[in-house]
Image: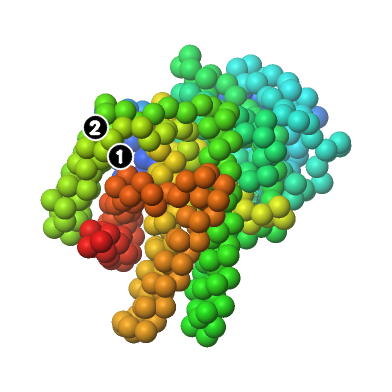
Amino acid sequence: MTAAAVALDHRLARALDAWLPWQRWYAGKGRPHTAVTVVQSTPFSELPDGSVGSILVLRVDFADRGAAEHYQVPVGIRASLPDPVAPYLIAALDDLVVYEATGDHELVTELLGLVAGEHARDPLGFTSFGGFADGPPLSSRPLGVEQTNTSVVVDDRYVVKFFRRLHPGVNPELELPRALAASAGRHTAALHGAVEGHLDGAPVTYAVVQSFLAGAVDGWALAQDSLHRLRTEPWSAVREFAAEAFEMGRAVATVHAELAAGLGTGLLGPAELAGLAATMARQLDESCRVVPELALHRVDLAAAFAEVARLPGGAETQRVHGDLHLGQLLRGPAGWALIDFEGEPSLPMAERAVPHSPLRDVAGMLRSFEYAADHADLLAGPSNPAATARLRIWAEQGADAFCLGYAGVAGWDPRGQDALLRAHTLHKAVYEAHYEARHRPDFLPIPLAAVRRLLAQ
Ligand SMILES: Nc1ncnc2c1ncn2[C@@H]1O[C@H](COP(=O)(O)OP(=O)(O)O)[C@@H](O)[C@H]1O
Ligand SMILES: [Mg+2]
């Protein structure tokens, strides 16, 4: 059998069936599946020794008969496994080995060549934006961090992000940075290329190529460092972190302005406000079913969300990041940059493309400052009122500085739209409580404390 044919071989499907549920990015955990089927195989490279690179799309069907899920798995197929690729083995099938192409420098080089040359491998098309450095890359390495997708760093200059779960529609991580390309893009990683195709007749984004911000520190790591120093040098830690938060606010406001210029704005009229209030109330109900502690505050939370429906219309909406927190900001050589515009990976693309008030992103950041401080407080063990007070000051100064930085660029202070910002912030805390209850119950006290605090204000 040729390496190309094995890609559709039933033995491979069986091996993928066993391998898939163990992958970090697999979203179907806890949902028994009935079948894993290779529904698309696109060979993108045939090397002289007969080995093949192919982009597979797997469909997973579930016993609950709910919607099937699709996943992308770029694979290499060779007669024997090269040493550096050993950690990426998927299956050994008689005379052939199948492994993840993301771990194979030769195959990553081939893929980047297709993007640089804007080639097509039916049904996939490769597009380049703004060109690439000359010559083949010297090195590539999977990022190796906990992530929803799989990213490969090439020559410390580019990062190729392969989306794992595929949904019909253009991924915002392609759409938004492409719209930002017209502006200088100083506060995002520049977009260099994309791999796009079709699935069930709809367009699908398979991968994007962006600038790698080498040596960048992310906002969460910076906050951890600052919170550590807070114990010994409280005032300089607070001051220095607030200065960074101010710059983060400027970066977020700049990206918001660029997104509004590139993709347009709308208005929250009475109908939209009522719709937003209803969505927040519905999600509150779902979360109260999962988190009994949240149900204790249900009436007050519902009142805060109902207030949204009574607001005078007129607040602006636009495309936003949608999942903003400290970990989504990187401080590179040119200042703070926003990354990861894909939105919530489990949602259909149409839902991710809904315009929102920019306050949604601001609320994400305000929650993140508080989360970082409360997380440090929780890890510190038995309560120490002086340390807790310092943490509160750290979070409040960070949030204030962020809003001031934002206001300096946007021309309006997010805290001016009090009720809408409060509702978005509470909505985010409810989402966190739901998430923590499911995945990290030890951290559930963090969003619950936030809910109590916000409701007391
Ligand atoms: N352009 C980039 N430059 C430098 N590091 C990056 C870049 N993009 C992502 N990273 C790093 O990789 C991590 C995961 O990236 P992210 O896009 O958030 O992945 P995912 O959406 O799959 O979870 C980030 O937290 C960051 O540390
Ligand atoms: Mg993501």
In this picture the colour scheme is: rainbow
What amino acid is at disc 2? Ala
Q: Which mark is residue 443?
A: none
Tell me which numbered mark, 1 or 2, is placed earlier along the sequence.
1
Q: Please indicate, yes or no, whether residue 349 appears anywhere in the rendered image.
A: no
Residue 396 sits in quarter: bottom left
Does residue 25 lie above or below 8 as drawn?
below
Residue 55 placement (x, y as % from top left): 60, 29
Q: Is residue 297 left or right of residue 419?
A: left
Towards the viewer: 176 or 138:
176
Residue 389 sits in quarter: bottom left
SS class of the residue under badge 1?
loop
Q: Nearer the viewer, mark 1 or mark 2?
A: 2
**Rendered residue at 58%/43% (across/down):** 254
Q: Is residue 231 left or right of residue 159?
A: left
Towards the viewer: 396 or 103:
396
**Rendered residue at 48%/23% (across/down):** 169
Residue 260 placement (x, y as % from top left): 53, 32
Q: Which mark is residue 274?
A: 2
SS class of the residue under badge 2?
helix
Residue 212 placement (x, y as % from top left): 69, 47
Q: Please indicate, yes or no, whether residue 405 appears anywhere in the rendered image.
A: yes
Residue 48 placement (x, y as % from top left): 80, 29
Density class for disc 2 (Cα within 10 Å; few <14, some 14-19, many ≥20) is: some
Q: Which residue is mark 1?
A: 32
**Rendered residue at 42%/78% (across/down):** 390
Q: Is residue 45 left or right of residue 414?
A: right
Density class for disc 1 (Cα within 10 Å; few <14, some 14-19, many ≥20) is: few
Does residue 84 lie above or below 119 as drawn?
below
- Distance (Cα) linking label 1 and label 2: 38 Å
What amino acid is at disc 1? Pro
